[in-house]
Amino acid sequence: MLGSSDNAMGKHRKHRRKPSSRSRGMRLRRWAAARIRLDYPRAGRRGVTRWLPSWRQIALLFLFSLGSLTGLLSFLYLQTDIPKNLNDFATQQDNVYYWADGSEMARTGPVNRQEVPLDKVPEDVQWAVLAAENASFYTDSGVSPSGLMRAVTRMVTGGETQGGSTITQQYVKNAYLNQRQTFSRKLTEMFMAIKLDDRMTKREILQRYLNTSWFGRGSYGIQRAAYAYYGKDVSELNASEGALLASLLKGAGTFDPTLSAKNHKRAVDRWKWVLDRMVDIGKLSKSERARYTTFPEPKAQPKPVGLTGQVGYLVETAKAYVSSHTDISDADFDLGGYQIHTTFEKPKVQALAKAVKETRDNLDPEKRPEDRHVRIGAASVAPGGAIRALYGGPGYLEQGFNDANASTVPAGTSFTPFVYAAALRDGVLLERNGARTPVTPSTLYDGDNKIAVHTPEGPYWDRAGKIVRATNDDGASYG
């Protein structure tokens, strides 16, 4: 009996039910609570040491903070995207108009900038910029860890950031963001720079940076800067001149040597440093560096090429031609970047203006009433149809209306042949929405003096409430 009882007990123990998942969870929590508890203030310690965390607590806090920061940065990185469109300001350029001989006539547009491909910028000039701004450009990931640390430090101490940005970051700021030195803008700039570095080649980024950077003297982009400071195309610059332009990227108002004696000293020091830096990074030989001992003085700031005199009328005429003879929309044209080569010849424009002045000097509005309201417009046209010269008025800034292209204000009966030609081709509209009445050379019309001008609705009334009447020369009537 005892044996059978033992077997029964053994079988009972063998087939005992397993604990449920709920009971296992409770045991695990009790076990964790018994072994992992927040020992703070620390037990078994006295005085100040009770409140000092242990190295394990410090390590746990560090890992928690690191993980939280990593998670936050990862989230912000995923949420940051590169806009599809650049800032309007970053894409605007000036339109350049040229005389018939190829020399520059005028520039128009809100921004003095003209893009050039990177291949047109000499290697020495490229490396002068890189040496001054970001020597590790071709090897970095688009961001500067030291710049990030400075940004964080400034945020903690003063709420603003300072320099240390890579060229990629500077381009992002110029093309997509704003110039405010806030931490949030700096953080967005860095994430966008990392993504941009993955999507574009380094040469593409450098080209865009050089074409959007501010060089002072109203110039955006290294092409216009080359003209503004040295009066030459960027392709003609040497390393010494490139070093001066690279110095301006740090602040044109501070380093333009023509502005003040202090500026000149700062510019010379910075110019020397850039050239020496090029030697340090292996992009300029010591022998070549030794050749650049004389500071490349830039020319004085040129007066802007404006629209004074007849130039404004010429520009207006050329722009109207582009609008009517190409598929370039006015919106695209206003964004700039176009080079318009005209048929206008500067000597002939000046000669025509002189001839008009002589004619105008012979007018006597005090003695002859018919001279009081004279407007003069003139053009010189070559046999092939090219306009060589044009006179639109006393000066574009004085009179914006172009008398040489006065299609909105017909010059008396000189416009009549055009009206008759249109009538012969299309007929006339005597009733609104009705059929046009054909006009032929044998069609009769009223040629008497002071006949009423008619529209499809009836007589045409002026703003004074009077019927407008045509006046023939000398008041003659022809029936």
Image (cartoon, helix red, strand yellow):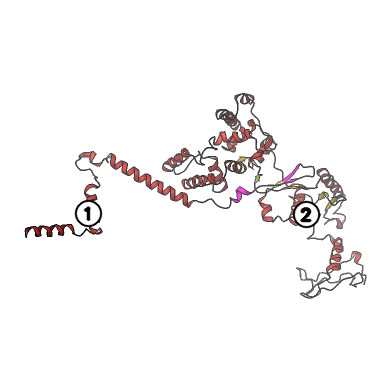
Q: Nearer the viewer, residue 414 or 142?
A: 142
Based on the displayed image, in which of its 4 quarters is residue 407 positioned?
bottom right
On the image, numbered disc 1 is attached to which residue? 27
Local crowd size for mark 2, using a 10 Å CA cut-off: few (<14), some (14–19), many (≥20): many
**Residue at 51%, 51% in the rendered image:** 81
Local crowd size for mark 1, using a 10 Å CA cut-off: few (<14), some (14–19), many (≥20): few
Q: Are marks 1 and 2 in contact (CB under 8 Å)?
A: no
Give the side of residue 432 with respect to residue 274, left or right: right
Q: Is 297 one of the magenta-colored residues?
A: no
Real-space Cα separation, disc 1 to disc 2, in angstroms: 95 Å
Q: Nearer the viewer, residue 279 or 174?
A: 279
The local secondary structure at tag 2 comes to: loop
Give the side of residue 329 with respect to residue 268, left or right: right
**Could you tell me if residue 238 is visible in this image?**
yes
* Residue 11 drawn above or below residue 198: below
Given this view, does label 1 or label 2 mark the residue nearer the observer? Answer: 1
The local secondary structure at tag 1 comes to: helix
On the image, numbered disc 2 is attached to which residue? 402
Q: Is 87 one of the magenta-colored residues?
A: yes
Q: Nearer the viewer, residue 302 or 163?
A: 163
Amino acid type, label 2: Asn
Q: Which residues are magenta?
A: 83-106
Counting the numbered discs, the total is 2
Looking at the rendered image, the quarter that the C terminus falls into is bottom right
